[in-house]
Image (cartoon, helix red, strand yellow):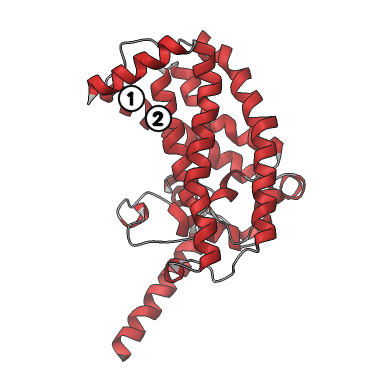
Amino acid sequence: MASVIESCWLYLITHFNDFQLSCLGSFFLHESAFFLSGLPFIFLERAGWLSKYKIQTKINSPEAQGKCITRLVLYHLCVNLPLIIASYPVFRFMGMKSSLPLPSWKVISTQILFYFIVEDFIFYWGHRILHTKWLYKHVHSIHHEYATPFGLTSEYAHPAEILFLGFATIVGPAITGPHLITLWLWMLVRVLETVEAHCGYHFPWSLSNFLPLYGGADFHDYHHRLLYTKSGNYSSTFVYLDWLFGTDKGYRTLKALKSCKNEAEGKQI
């Protein structure tokens, strides 16, 4: 398996230069992962398939979904792509490379774990700041236009927010100067995670059912349903900071009430 990956990587680095791979390759990978993982949830919602797993009963209109996609394409071309290009010299200065040999899986997994920790911390506090009155009204309210989120709404936000919270995603890799393949894997995992958190469905196979500290769709969907002053659930991937600072109390209380209700109904049956 390792030899196959190395052969594919050798093909890439012999046919494309470092700038093309780091900037255009990263952008292409992001767009592919984002839209291929997010678009199915639009069709699921429209068709009503798997509706028993949908967290909210409300359905977004085709017009609302179309608006989201149009804005996303604009933001990605005018904000995300320039940001990737502008950050390229920083990553190169910090030691990022694309040549062989590829890093070991131990190195890759250790670095990605570090990125999760850094991203969670910066995102949590940045997200809380965005829920202050002025910033919510003028910046973050755009992301909350969709009280019933679907996968693609994960990156639907004001350009200033894209830059602000995007910093949380890239600061870890910028510090370590990883191999490009590590950066790509981090980007892929992060995209899939944020799309899942906004998908609007809680499946039996959702990661939050198996990983106690993982937030997932049910955790983040609660955040979108409430007014900005009372929302809580500010975390990105893992929920320990919300637990530590008590910003998930409303969500935990609601979960406990639902659990008691289900138990009571079960006893009646």
**Position of 117 compared to 81: left or right?**
left
Q: Residues within 10 Å of mark 2 (few under 14, many from 20)?
A: some
On the image, the x and y values in percent for residue 85 come to 61, 19
- Residue at position x 27%, y 20% in the image: 104
Residue farthest to the bottom, as pictured: 268
* Secondary structure state at the residue bearing disc 2: helix
Quarter containing the N terminus: top left
On the image, the x and y values in percent for residue 87 come to 59, 19
- Residue at position x 42%, y 61% in the image: 202
Viewer can see residue 96: no
Marks 2 and 1 close (CB-CB < 8 Å): yes
**Would you name the residue on which mark 2 appears?**
185
**Would you name the residue on which mark 1 appears?**
108
Distance, label 2 to label 1, CA atoms, is: 9 Å
Checking the image for residue 157, the label placed there is none
- Residue at position x 43%, y 51% in the image: 215
On the image, the x and y values in percent for residue 74 come to 70, 38
**Position of 46 compared to 244: left or right?**
right
Residue 15 is drawn in which quadrant?
top left
Quarter containing the C terminus: bottom left
163 to 220, vertically: above or below: above
State which tag comes first along the sequence, 2 or 1: 1
